[in-house]
Image (cartoon, rainbow, N blue to C red):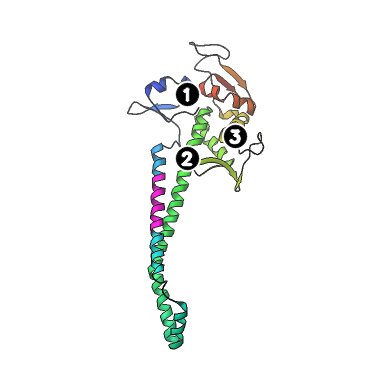
């Protein structure tokens, strides 16, 4: 289960001692997850609102361009050719040039605005996607008890593995091809499965857990005994991910 970004005092007290260290209190008495890169839900909502507004503006401008072009739909090319035949070549060419210039003068500013809005929309979408990915990676790292000092390294490893955001969903892709789960042929690799495998081979990224002061195999203050995993395999690490998060399982490098 992932860790919430903001907790009340009661929720914070209910957490295992090892997890409570990840939170800091604010001036409202709430406890906030103290991890670099965590993006508030309000910020993600702002990204989505900006994207909707940009799309609406782009569609409106496209409609204006279409309206302007329709004003010239009544001009028959054959009639223009007939007029050119009746006029001196120089006069016909001049009329055609003026018509072309007039059309460009009316449509060019709107076309440029549409192009600019499209670029802004693309940039906003990229920022929103990056915020979503960063938040998912931080939450996953916190749940798996990655050392606070190693979270940036964890995020870099995940991005190198191909994790990105498409349609608001975190997926793993490389060169436009979906990365598959080596343990489940044909199935896409999920962030959770990748985390299990990665931290099983990079245990130095995971903080040693003692379950709030309890000695391995013993109890302290009524807490459950702590299970110790020494250099666990990816499968064993995955099976014990919840215990690692709540402090009842300890990983030894």
In reply to whether residue 86 is colored magenta, the answer given is: no
Q: Residue at the location (44% across, 55% down)?
A: 118
Between disc 3 and disc 1, the foreground one is 3
Figure check: 90 above or below 118: below
Q: Which residues are magenta?
A: 48-60
Mark 3 or 2, nearer chain start: 2
The image quadrant of residue 231 is top right
Which x, y percent locates residue 200? 62, 29
Query: Is residue 208 something that shows in the picture?
Result: no
Circle 1 Cα neighbour tier, 10 Å, few/some/many (<14 / 14–19 / ≥20): many
Q: Which residue is mark 1?
A: 19
Rounded to the nearest angstrom, the CA distance separating label 3 from label 1 is 22 Å
Mark 3 or 1, nearer chain start: 1
Tag 1 secondary structure: helix
Q: Which residue is mark 2?
A: 132
Which residue is farthest left? 28
Which x, y percent locates residue 39? 43, 37
Rounded to the nearest angstrom, the CA distance separating label 1 from label 2 is 23 Å
């Amino acid at each position: 289960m992932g860790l919430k970004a903001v907790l009340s005092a009661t929720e914070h007290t209910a957490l295992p001692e090892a997890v409570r260290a990840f939170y800091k209190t604010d001036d409202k008495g709430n406890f906030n997850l103290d991890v670099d890169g965590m993006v508030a839900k309000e910020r993600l909502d702002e990204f989505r609102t900006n994207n909707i507004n940009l799309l609406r503006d782009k569609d409106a401008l496209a409609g204006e361009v279409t309206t302007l072009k329709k004003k010239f739909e009544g001009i028959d090319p054959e009639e223009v050719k007939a007029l050119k035949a009746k006029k001196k070549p120089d006069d016909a060419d001049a009329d055609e040039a003026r018509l072309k210039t007039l059309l460009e003068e009316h449509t060019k500013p709107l076309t440029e605005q549409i192009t600019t809005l499209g670029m802004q929309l693309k940039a906003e979408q990229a920022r929103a996607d990056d915020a979503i990915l960063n938040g998912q990676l931080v939450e996953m790292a916190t749940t798996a008890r990655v050392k606070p000092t190693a979270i940036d390294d964890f995020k870099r490893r995940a991005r190198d593995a191909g994790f990105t955001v498409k349609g608001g969903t975190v997926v793993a892709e490389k060169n436009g091809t979906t990365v598959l789960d080596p343990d489940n042929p044909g199935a896409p690799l999920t962030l959770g499965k990748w985390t299990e495998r990665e931290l099983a081979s990079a245990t130095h990224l995971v903080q040693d857990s003692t379950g709030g002061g309890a000695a391995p195999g013993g109890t302290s203050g009524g807490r459950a005994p702590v299970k110790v995993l020494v250099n666990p395999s990816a499968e064993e690490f995955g099976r014990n991910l919840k215990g690692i998060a709540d402090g009842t399982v300890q990983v030894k490098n």
